[in-house]
């Protein structure tokens, strides 16, 4: 006979569940390029004297070599660029080095050849701002769309310095401080492209 006052039966014991952790997961985010880190120092090599090729594979080194060439140039700077590489060139130290170079002597010349200016215009690149202020000896032109050109960026400093980025989106390449032969070869490439270059409507709108 069922006793209504009896306590309810104890629940049946459940089987234990074994749990195994899958372990830790590593999250890999793309490398972040800061446009304006707290410090940026030039590489300790002398333009026109240092002979070895200096290879680099990170942002800190490429910026150091870029600054060393910009700060030591005394006559001409030529930049052959995909889109003014913002991860490298849109930086206060680069702007200051170019400004010092242009103000050092009225005959100093900075020329830039761009494949695409749209991103630089949209972002308000520092070198475009500098071009507004010092346009008399700072010239920016657009590569002719039909001109055969490499997917490469390079910087020429006077007649001996050269920095090359084989892939403009990557901080990998090399710098030369005393190589007249390679500098001259790239200078001839730059000058041929400059002869067929065009004024850029994006840049004209930005400079107005």
Image (cartoon, rainbow, N blue to C red):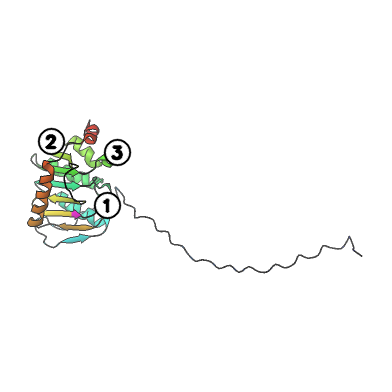
- Say which residue label 1 marks: 169
- Answer yes or no: do the residues labelled 3 and 2 have beta carbons within 8 Å? no
> Distance from label 3 to label 2 (Cα)?
23 Å
The location of residue 5, given as percent across then percent down, is 88, 61
Query: Residue 136: which disc?
Result: 2
- Answer yes or no: do the residues labelled 1 and 3 have beta carbons within 8 Å? no
State the predominant SS element of the stretch in magenta.
loop
**Residue sitting at x 24%, y 34%:** 206
- Viewer-side label of 3, 2: 3
In the rendered view, tell whether residue 165 sits above or below residue 23.
Answer: above
The location of residue 146, given as percent across then percent down, is 18, 43
Which badge, 3 or 2, comes first in the chain's sequence?
3
The location of residue 114, given as percent across then percent down, is 20, 43
- Say which residue label 3 marks: 122
Q: 203 and 90: which one is in front? A: 203
Residue 167: say if magenta: yes
The location of residue 61, given as percent across then percent down, is 23, 57
- Viewer-side label of 1, 2: 1
> Distance from label 1 to label 2 (Cα)?
30 Å
Which of the 4 image quadrants contains residue 111? top left
Q: What is the tally of numbered marks visible in this picture?
A: 3
Task: Give, as a single range, the part of the protein colored magenta.
Answer: 164-170
In the rendered view, tell whether residue 83 sits above or below residue 205.
Answer: below
Q: 3 and 114: which one is in front? A: 114
Q: Residues within 10 Å of mark 1 (few under 14, many from 20)?
A: some
Residue 141: say if magenta: no
Say whether residue 120 is left or right of residue 78: right
In which quadrant will I find the C terminus? Answer: top left
- Report helix, strand or loop for mark 1: loop
């Amino acid at each position: 006979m069922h006793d209504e006052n009896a306590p309810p039966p104890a629940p049946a014991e459940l089987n234990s569940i074994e749990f195994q952790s899958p372990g830790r997961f590593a999250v890999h985010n793309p490398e972040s390029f800061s446009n304006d880190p707290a410090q940026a120092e030039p590489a300790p090599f002398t333009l026109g004297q240092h002979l070895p090729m200096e290879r680099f594979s990170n942002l800190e080194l490429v910026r150091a070599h870029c600054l060393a060439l910009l700060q030591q140039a005394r006559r001409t700077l030529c930049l052959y660029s995909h889109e003014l590489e913002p991860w490298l060139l849109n930086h206060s130290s680069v702007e200051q080095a170019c400004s010092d170079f242009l103000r050092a002597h009225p005959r100093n010349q900075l020329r830039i050849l761009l494949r695409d200016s749209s991103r630089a215009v949209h972002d308000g690149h520092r070198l475009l701002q500098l071009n507004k202020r010092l346009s008399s000896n700072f010239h920016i032109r657009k590569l002719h769309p039909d001109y055969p050109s490499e997917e490469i960026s390079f910087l020429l400093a006077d007649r001996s310095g050269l920095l090359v980025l084989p892939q403009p989106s990557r901080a990998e390449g090399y710098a030369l401080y005393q190589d007249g032969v390679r500098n001259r070869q790239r200078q001839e490439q730059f000058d041929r492209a400059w002869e067929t270059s065009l004024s850029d409507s994006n840049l004209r709108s930005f400079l107005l």
